[in-house]
Image (spheres, coloured by chain):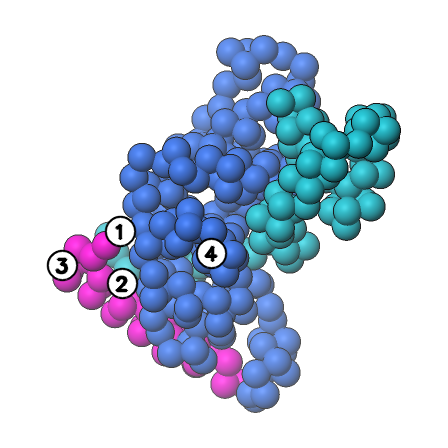
Amino acid sequence: MTVEAMSMHVELTDAQLVARCRSGDHQAWNELVERFSRYVYAIAIQAFKLPEHDAEDVFQEVFTRAYEHLHKLRSDEAIRPWLAQLTRRLCIDRLRASLQEQPEDVPEPVDVEDTIGRLDEAMAVHEALAILPDNCQDILDRFFAKDESYRTIGEALDLPSGTIASRISRCLVKLRVQMEGRNSGPATS
Amino acid sequence: MSGYEEERLGELLSSLPPAPEPWVHAAKQIPQVGERLDRIVERAESDEEYRRKVVADPEAALEEADVIAHSDAVEILRRKLDK
């Protein structure tokens, strides 16, 4: 997901985005893919530890089915758990196919629930990140999610590499304040 | 979430790396792919010889329609042709 896309996403709730997709808005579909692509990818790779080529098939199938069955979603706000469930089911199918066993013979990896819980938490942090100034979004995403070095970040953002660590630290403080504000304030969407 | 230590926030940010860009690009194309598949099916319904070609080699039909012949696209095309 690009930083620009992340910024744009905070304008629409999940429910609003789903409603637009259902009305045939291709731009909204692009945004939906951007918003949830990391989540679906992480479930396949981290929770189920699928090899890359299987994860790619699951990833495409999740979004294909999501597009085809979006009208069946009972609550537009429930898109994230729905995608998580769909991804889990397709990952299990993939594991079963690779082992040539029946579904009941292939249990989920033991820590799937915990991993998805952690990813849900990470999605909340990403939502908070999208509200921070662009420079903070960019530097935190590059350093943590994209695993870029200080040198690479410095070159990309035209910053002295010696200042990167302190900028990251300041941006993390802003992110923490943002997260605390979200959780202590009234519920939104 | 409880305890917003910076280290914990960093760990959570690290747990959502970007999906490979070609995957994301392909997923964004799903609506357009659906429309192209519908056009293939429409043509197959009115042209028996074309239908036979598509059934025999769906990958080639997809490539001709400028659709990446991903396994999902092939499966969806088969389902639509069977309807």
Q: Position of residue A72 (x, y in %)?
A: 39, 33
The span from disc 3 to disc 4 (Cα, nearest Å) is 30 Å
> Amino acid under label 2?
Met
Magenta-tinted stretch: A161-189
The local secondary structure at tag 1 comes to loop
Cα distance in 3D space between marks 4 and 2: 31 Å
Residue B67 position, x and y percent, is 74, 47
Circles 1 and 4 on the same subunit = no
Label 1: how many Cα within 10 Å (few below 14, some 14–19, many 20+): few
Q: Chain B's shade in the image?
A: cyan
Label 1 sits on residue = B1
Mark 1: which amino acid? Met
A146, above or below A170, in the image: above
Q: Residues within 10 Å of mark 4 (few under 14, many from 20)?
A: some
The disc placed on residue A186 is 3
Question: Which residue is labeled 4 in the image?
Answer: A25
Kindly report which numbered mark, 3 or 4, lies closer to the viewer in this rendering. 4
Tell me where residue A33 appears, x and y as whole percent.
51, 52
Residue depicted at x 50% and y 42%: A67
Taking the spot 54% from the left edge, 25% from the top edge, the residue there is A92
